[in-house]
Structures are given as structure tokens and as C-alpha cells.
Image: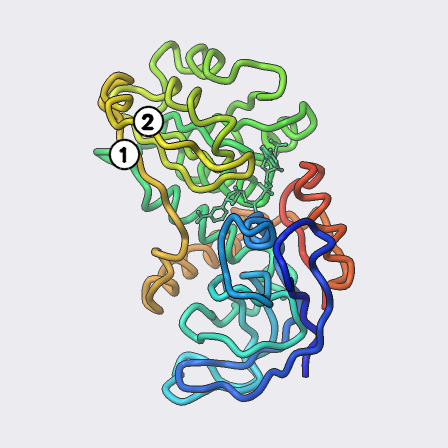
Amino acid sequence: MSKAVRIHQTGGPEQMVMDDVPVGEPGPGEIRIRHAAIGLNYIDVYYRTGLYPQDLPGGLGMEGAGVVEAVGEGVTHLRPGDRAAYAGQPPGAYCEQRVMPARCVCRLPDAIDFETGAAMMLKGLTAQYLLRRTLPQGGLQPGDFVLFHAIAGGVGLIAAQWARLLGLQLIGTAGSDEKCELARSMGAAHTINYKREDFAARVREITGGQGVKVVYDSVGKDTWERSLECLRPFGLMACFGNSSGPVPPMAPALLGAKGSLYLTRQTIFTHIATRESTQAMADELFEVVGSGQVKIRIDQRFALAEVQQAHRELEARRTTGSTILLP
Ligand SMILES: NC(=O)c1ccc[n+]([C@@H]2O[C@H](COP(=O)([O-])OP(=O)(O)OC[C@H]3O[C@@H](n4cnc5c(N)ncnc54)[C@H](OP(=O)(O)O)[C@@H]3O)[C@@H](O)[C@H]2O)c1
């Protein structure tokens, strides 16, 4: 048996309760892992509220690190006793121990501790696929401007550092002056406090009227329309989240009117659908983190039993960087 935070109905943070659940043995293609640390992500809020559906009662959490205890038939890249970390479906990381698909689990390099592993897999692989794989026509070259919303958050602070490493001029938005300062100290070339400034006007100013080649937008409803104003002709609008609510339906003609723009809605789960792709992405992440070029900030730590409070902090925009839960 394992302690596991689950929801029996969707709703607010109070719906998350600690249950005792059976764990069992891994089947073909699965492993059993004992968590040392668990990552908190905004997607956990979408599952908790029901914005993203699942069968109930359901587990929550898609990121963790710990020790592999057992491997099922056909699993060759992991052995019992390995240190490992993952981002992946199905939800259920908020627990001491679980059986899960091995495909998305990677061996953790010795130089990376469990807390860092749990704080960086889902967020870091997201920063990787956005900046390295979600590109405008012709790609991104050093010196190019990109706009990245919620830059002081978990994904944001990793992206700010990685963008600097790639030589990009990243313009980041955040909801307070303190968050903007933090993001600049971590590598953002420019920041905009979008609670008090018109970010589209500021982006035009910073780019000398040109606009950016890509907008990486995880805020959704509140930023969608003005994000389109920030793009150069043929620019790419890369939506990847809805922290302020989902983007309403739109007519494709709008993209023409704004300058023959491209639109994509990305999810990490397409990118980590195969073992090979997951490992290739993770290898890049391990390289930039292991070499110290990208630092993983854990700004909040909670006991797993305090998960309700952790969700309240995240939704109230009171967190920066990564948050982890300790079982
Ligand atoms: N599609 C994918 O593959 C994928 C993968 C990972 C993450 N994501 C998305 O990326 C985003 C960042 O994820 P994260 O886990 O690192 O979270 P996070 O950025 O640490 O937290 C979310 C941030 O969004 C901003 N925000 C803006 N409007 C908000 C609102 N109305 N309510 C709450 N927050 C609001 C807040 O920053 P400010 O106060 O600075 O505005 C808040 O701190 C989320 O939208 C998440 O769903 C998508």
C-alpha cells in the first residue's frame, strides 16, 4: 500500500485527500518507483478542477524522482536500485510509491539530486521542446527576439536561462516587479510587468517596431489577443497552457489579417510519446543542468500532506520557479 493524494470529485484544493492505495507489481513495460520528491505543475490544477478530464477517483501529479524498485517484462533501460526521474502520464505522482509506464522514466545522472530531478523533468522538457523544437519558419538564430509569458514561473525560469544559452533575446512577462527582476537575474534580456504595462506596446518598443518571431503563451485567455499583436509577419504563436483560462474559439482569417501568422497548440505528451524521443530530450536537459548552465530553482517545498496549500499558492500566483512535494 502507498499513501496517495487523490480526488473523488473535481473542484477546489479541498477535493484533494490522502488515500491508502494498493501498489502491486509492474506489468510488461512498467516499473515501480519509490518517490524521494514530487514535482508540482500547473497541469495538476487543470486535472483537479476538471478542465482536463479523467476517470474518478483519480490520482494527480506527472513529475517525480526516486529509486526504481522493480521492473516489468521488456524494460531494458532501467534496473532495480537505479536513481530515476520522469515527466509523464497518467496522473498519479502525488504518492510515496507507484507503478507506471517505464517509457517516460529516465536514469538520473549522479550529479543531479532527487529534488532537482523532481523539480525539472516536466518543466525542463517543456522548455526544451519549446525552444528547440517549436520554431518559426527558418528556425531561430542568435539575436532573434521571442516573447515568453509567465517568465518567473517553473517553466519560465528554465526557459529564460536556456534562451540566453541559445543567444536569443527573450522578452519575459510576469505579474510583479519582483518577479521581473528575478527573471532578469536568471537570463531574461527584457521583462515586462503585464499587470501594469501594455505588454504589446512594450514589445513593439523593445523590438524597434518589428515584433517577435515567436510568442510562447501558457497564460491563455488573458494574453491571447494581445500576443498576436506582438508577432512579426509569418511569426509563430505557440500556445501551451491556460493558467488564466482556455482561449475561446477563433476564425482562422484573423491569422491572415495579423500578418500570415502560424498558430500551434503544443503539449509535452506528443514529444515524449516514445522512449527514444524522451531520452533525447532528457539528455539535452541533463547536459545544460549538469553543467550548471541552467539552474533549477526550488523556491517552494511542501510536505505531500500539505498539497492543498501548495495548490493555493500556485493558483494565487504567489510562487516562483519550481515547487516540490516531499512524501
Ligand atoms: N503544454 C505543455 O506541454 C505544458 C507543459 C508544462 C507546462 N505547461 C503550462 O505552462 C504554464 C506554466 O506551468 P508551471 O507549472 O511552470 O506554472 P507556473 O508558471 O509556475 O505558474 C503559473 C503562472 O502563470 C501566471 N498566471 C497568469 N495568469 C494567471 C492566472 N489567472 N492564474 C494563475 N496564474 C496565472 C502566474 O505568473 P505571473 O504572476 O507572473 O503572471 C503564475 O505564477 C502553465 O500554463 C502550464 O499549464 C504546458
Q: Quadrant of ligand 1?
A: top right
Badge 1 is on which residue?
A: 136
Which residue position holds label 2?
213
Q: Is residue 302 left or right of residue 218?
A: right
Could you tell me the amino acid type at mark 2? Lys
**In the image, is the residue at mark 2 within 8 Å of ligand 1 by its beta carbon?**
no
Instruction: Please say if 99 is above or below 198.
Output: below
Q: Position of residue 261 (x, y in %)?
A: 26, 26
Residue nearer the viewer, 63 or 285:
63
Relative horizontal placement of residue 220, taking residue 14 as reference (left or right):
left
Instruction: Give whichever of 44, 132 is nearer the camera.
Output: 44
Choose between 174 and 111: the one closer to the eye. Answer: 174
Residue lying at 51% horizontally and 31% vertically, measured from the top left:
149
User: Height in image: 170 above or below 98?
Assistant: above
Q: Quadrant of the C terminus?
A: bottom right
Quadrant including the N terminus: bottom right
Q: Is there a contact, CB below 8 Å, between mark 1 and mark 2?
A: yes
- 280, 198: nearer the viewer: 198
Mark 1 element type: loop
Task: Classify 10 Å Cα crowding around label 1: few (below 14), some (14-19), many (20 and above).
Answer: some
Can you tell which mark lies on residue 152? Answer: none
Q: Position of residue 18 (x, y in %)?
A: 73, 68
The residue at the point 65 percent across, 79 percent down is 21
Residue drawn at point x = 68 percent, y = 66 percent: 5
The quarter of the picture where residue 102 lies is bottom left
Residue drawn at (72%, 43%) of the image: 313
Q: Quadrant of residue 110?
A: bottom right
